[in-house]
Each structure stands twice: as structure tokens, then as C-alpha cells.
Image (tube, helix red, strand yellow):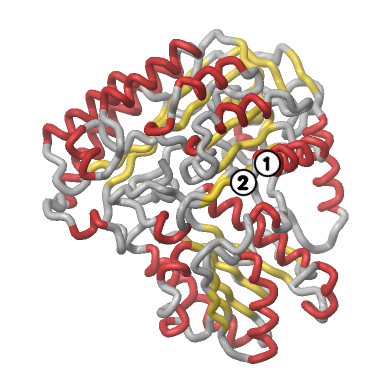
């Protein structure tokens, strides 16, 4: 339903809440869902409304074996609220909706709309149809109807933005269900990507993250193996764009021209998040990962030769079916050699619908837990050692919003260094805003953050800070539609063992 039909879509101004689970792709999809709902006349419910909205949308993830239990538990808690609130609607979308389309309404008959990953643009229409017909609407497209970036988007940040360059994935990793749910890779036209970035920069955005299920395979649609490196260089020509990041690349497609483009394009940040998953060649083969340990470490070596200060992070799965102690030791060896700035380590759990779920050699939980603890301890020490090398360095930190959970208690501010390390710093005398840049000297290092305790060496007000201030002022003037917290940009702090990998990305 177009924004031109607002009076038809919503008779009175109603509120909405979007709950997001899973990877960066889901976070960005939720920005689009919010944009669609606001285009149809809804306003965002205040933070902490906890289901007290006219429309509650679940944007789901399907990579964990208990993902459905989490969804149905949340839906169950909303059932009595819906009974007491006439006209309230509940919608379920995302990967789990794509996978379990026929069972959601059977298990939770109070759900009004079920939609898939390929047709998120239909949400306002489906909500209206469910209201008029007074019955659940289930619509799951089997292929992409339109590239999602053509949809309206409610950006969560005024200074940093996700930009999708592709959707879907052509890989067949045995632990990942994403290709079955999001389909084969489909690339956007380069001109459309650059036009979106230029429009964002004109609005004040100074940092963008190029987003794709397998981001550096960009160009496979047109047979141009250097399309991604060309795109990075093109981003370097956009005036006002200060920082460019991307996630997540696959080692198979990480070619020398990409490394050269990263090193030679000033606004492409010295940061790389590249999933390794395992250091064992036999496990990588069982995962259907098309590289081996030597190939992965060789890429790391080339990146560091071109960008000595680059911070490199990764994803690792512990306890994949068939993993022996020798296989695990190969992962430990690779971690020692790679010296990651941080690693997101996950205990393997069955993803329903994946080949790995039915493999022989499932590892006992206690063995997986013990290995996970050993790997976590090793990576924790490496992260700390690598962060200690930052002490004494002078860094330009982009002030962030919502990244320093203890900032109020410590009377500090927080932001991200060019390599995406989290930096807590003493506030300067001059007021600064998210999006502004502060130059600091690092005085202390912890495993997962850096500290600059002295007076900042410099402050640069930016157009991004102006954009944040304008948005905040406008939001404060509105009685409804309170802004929610920002999603993290780039690699967040390490997650617990129960967290899901980034949608199987990489």
C-alpha cells in the first residue's frame, strides 16, 4: 500500500513495534518494515512498550534449533494482551516465517499476518486485508519480488547506515539454512547502490556499511570478479563519505584486487570481519567451505602486509559434527597464527533443515562446552594483547550513541576508532554529538575496549553530528514515535555462546 493511501490504511494514528532477531540483514530489513509502516500512517511505539502497540511485528531468525520456541513463547505472552486490546494485530516475518509458513498460525492462531523474506513490502497491505477480512493472511513469496532497497526505510541512525548491495547466497554450507530461505544471490546495480549512498551522505550520514550475505561475491550476476573492488573504489570518490565498512566477506571470493582497493581507498576502514568457522581442513570440507587453513591464513597475511594496522575479526563454530580433538587443535593453531582482534565463537547447535543436523558424529554437549571455554580463553588473551598495542596511539574516534553501557556512571563518552575498536574517552570541554569526531590518545587497553583518560586532543564537528542533532530535536518535539536505541555498526562486542552467528553469513 502506497504512502498516498494513508487515510485508507489507518483510520486513526496507530502505533507499531518491530522486534528483530538475528543478523545485520534482519536489522536492515526491520528498518524497511518500520519505513513501510510509517509510510502507511503508523507511528513507532515508545521504547519499552513491550507489546503495548496496535501492531507488533516479529522479524525472525531461523539459524538456531530453539528459534521457534523463542518465537512461540513471545507470541504466547502477547495472546492475553491481544484479547484485551480490540484491533491489535500481530505479524510474523523473516527467515522462520519463510521456513515454517504453514505451522505458525496453527500453533498461534491469534497471529494476523505471516510474510516471508522476499515480500516484506506487502506488510501494510496484508495487515489491512487481515483487518477487513477478519482472518489471518499468509503470503510467502518464493522469489524476490523487488530489491528491498527500493522500499521506504526508517534509518535508526542519523550518522551511520547499512546499504545492501546483494541479497541471497550461492554457497551450500552444511550448517546454514540461509540460502534456502533467502534464495540465490541477487546483486543490485552499482549505480543504484552509489545513488543510495550519495543520498544518505546528502542527509548527513558519514559512515556506511555495505551489506550482503556474501558481500564480496558481488558481481556474480554479471560475471565481473572485480565488481566489489570497483565498488569500494567508487565509494572513495563520494565527497563527504568518511568511513566505509563491509560485512561479511567469504574467503573464497577474497581476491587481491579487494585487498588493494581497501589499502588504496582512504575512506575504506582498516577493518575486516571474515568468518573462518574452523581451522581444520577436514571440518572445513565437511562444512562445504571452499578454502582450507593455509588459504585463510594467507589472506590474513596479505591484508596485514597491505594494512599493518588492520583489525581482523572472525566467526568460529566449536563442536561441528565429527570434530576430533585434533581438529579442534587445528582451530586453536589458526587462532594463534591469525591473532584476531576479536572472534565470535559459537557452540554448534543443530539448525533444522541443514545437512549438518543429520550428520553422524554429533559431539556431546559437555565436550563442546569444554572446547568452547578453551577457545574463548585463548581468544580473550589474544584480544587483550592486540589491544595493548594500541596504547599510546592517537586515534580519530567517531562519537557513537548507545555503545557505552556504563558511560553515565563513568562520565565518559564512547565511539569507534577507524579499525572499529570501541573507545571510551573523557568528554572534551566542547560539547560533542554522535557523528562528530574526537582525537584522543589511548592510555589503557582491556580485551574488548580501549580507554582514553586524558583530555581529547581535538574535536571536529561534522555534518553527521548536525544531522543527529536535527533528528533528535525533531523527535523530542513529537509526542509519539520516540526513537529506539541504535543497532551496533560494525562488529559488536563478543556474544555469549548461545547467540547465533550472523545468519550463517560468510
The residue shown at (17%, 55%) is 359
Which residue position holds label 2? 188
Q: Nearer the viewer, residue 118 or 82?
A: 118
Residue 52 seen in render: no
Location of residue 465 (image quadrant): top right
Residues under numbered marks 2 and 1 in contact, where contact means CB atoms less than 8 Å apart: yes
Give the x, y percent position of residue 251. 38, 32
The residue shown at (53%, 26%) is 421
Give the x, y percent position of residue 171. 37, 47
- Tally the marks: 2
Residue 498 seen in render: yes
Give the x, y percent position of residue 231. 62, 31
In the rendered view, does 440 fall on the left or right side of 429? Answer: left
In the rendered view, does 372 fall on the left or right side of 82? Answer: left
Quarter of the image with the N terminus in it = bottom right
Mark 2 vs mark 1, CA separation in Å:
7 Å
Q: Nearer the viewer, residue 30 or 454?
A: 30
Location of residue 316 (image quadrant): top left
Which residue position holds label 1? 193
The residue shown at (64%, 46%) is 486
Please say if 272 is above or below 90.
above
Q: Earlier in the sequence, mark 2 or mark 1?
A: 2
Quarter of the image with the C terminus in it = top left
Please say if 201 is above or below 420.
below
Q: Nearer the viewer, residue 486 or 253?
A: 253
Give the x, y percent position of residue 168. 48, 52
The outermost residue toward the front is 223
Q: Secondary structure at mark 1?
A: helix
Badge 2: how crowded within 10 Å, few (<14), some, or many (20+)?
Answer: some
Amino acid at each position: 500500500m502506497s504512502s498516498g493511501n494513508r487515510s485508507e490504511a489507518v483510520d486513526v494514528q496507530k502505533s507499531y513495534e518491530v522486534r528483530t532477531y538475528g543478523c545485520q540483514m534482519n536489522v536492515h530489513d526491520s528498518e524497511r518494515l518500520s519505513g513501510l509502516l510509517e509510510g502507511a500512517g503508523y507511528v513507532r511505539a515508545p521504547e519499552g512498550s513491550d507489546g503495548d502497540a496496535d501492531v507488533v511485528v516479529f522479524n525472525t531468525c531461523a539459524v538456531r534449533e530453539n528459534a521457534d520456541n523463542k518465537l512461540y513463547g513471545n507470541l504466547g505472552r502477547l495472546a492475553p494482551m491481544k484479547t484485551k486490546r480490540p484491533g491489535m494485530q500481530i505479524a510474523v516475518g523473516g527467515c522462520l516465517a519463510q521456513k515454517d509458513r504453514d505451522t505458525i498460525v496453527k500453533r498461534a492462531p491469534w497471529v494476523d499476518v505471516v510474510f516471508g523474506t522476499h515480500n516484506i513490502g506487502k506488510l501494510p497491505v496484508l495487515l489491512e486485508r487481515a483487518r477487513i477480512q477478519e482472518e489471518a493472511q499468509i503470503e510467502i513469496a518464493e522469489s524476490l519480488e523487488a530489491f528491498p532497497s527500493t522500499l521506504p526505510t526508517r534509518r535508526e541512525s542519523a550518522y551511520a547506515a547499512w546499504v545492501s548491495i546483494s541479497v541471497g547466497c550461492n554457497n551450500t554450507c552444511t550448517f546454514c539454512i540461509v540460502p534456502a530461505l533467502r534464495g540465490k544471490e541477487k546483486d543490485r546495480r552499482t549505480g543504484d547502490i552509489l545513488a543510495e549512498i550519495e543520498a544518505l551522505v546528502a542527509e548527513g550520514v558519514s559512515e556506511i556499511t555495505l551489506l550482503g550475505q556474501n558481500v564480496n561475491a558481488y558481481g556474480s550476476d554479471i560475471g565481473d570478479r572485480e565488481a566489489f573492488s570497483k565498488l569500494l573504489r567508487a565509494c572513495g570518490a563520494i565527497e563527504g563519505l568518511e568511513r566505509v565498512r563491509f560485512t561479511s566477506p567469504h574467503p573464497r571470493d577474497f581476491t587481491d584486487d579487494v585487498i588493494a582497493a581497501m589499502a588504496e581507498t582512504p575512506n575504506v576502514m582498516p577493518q575486516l570481519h571474515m568468518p573462518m568457522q574452523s581451522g581444520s581442513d577436514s571440518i572445513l570440507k565437511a562444512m562445504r567451505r571452499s578454502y582450507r587453513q593455509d588459504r585463510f591464513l594467507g589472506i590474513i597475511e596479505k591484508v596485514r602486509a597491505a594494512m599493518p594496522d588492520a583489525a581482523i575479526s572472525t566467526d568460529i563454530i566449536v563442536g561441528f559434527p565429527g570434530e576430533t580433538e585434533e581438529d579442534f587443535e587445528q582451530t586453536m593453531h589458526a587462532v594463534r597464527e591469525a591473532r584476531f582482534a576479536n572472534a565470535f565463537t559459537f557452540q554448534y547447535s543443530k539448525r533444522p533443515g541443514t545437512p549438518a543436523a543429520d550428520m553422524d558424529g554429533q559431539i556431546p554437549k559437555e565436550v563442546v562446552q569444554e572446547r568452547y571455554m578453551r577457545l574463548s580463553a585463548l581468544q580473550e588473551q589474544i584480544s587483550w594483547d592486540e589491544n595493548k598495542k594500541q596504547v599510546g596511539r592517537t586515534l580519530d574516534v567517531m562519537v557513537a550513541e548507545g555503545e557505552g553501557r556504563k558511560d553515565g556512571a563513568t562520565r565518559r563518552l564512547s565511539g569507534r576508532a577507524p579499525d572499529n575498536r570501541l573507545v571510551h574517552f573523557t568528554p572534551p570541554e566542547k560539547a560533542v554529538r554522535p557523528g562528530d569526531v574526537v582525537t584522543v590518545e589511548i592510555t589503557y587497553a582491556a580485551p574488548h575496549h580501549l580507554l582514553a583518560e586524558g583530555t581529547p586532543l581535538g574535536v571536529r564537528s561534522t555534518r553527521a553530528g548536525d544531522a543527529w542533532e536535527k533528528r533528535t530535536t525533531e523527535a523530542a518535539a513529537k509526542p509519539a514515535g520516540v526513537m529506539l536505541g541504535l543497532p551496533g555498526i560494525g562488529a559488536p562486542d563478543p556474544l555469549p555462546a548461545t547467540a547465533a552467528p550472523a545468519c550463517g553469513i560468510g
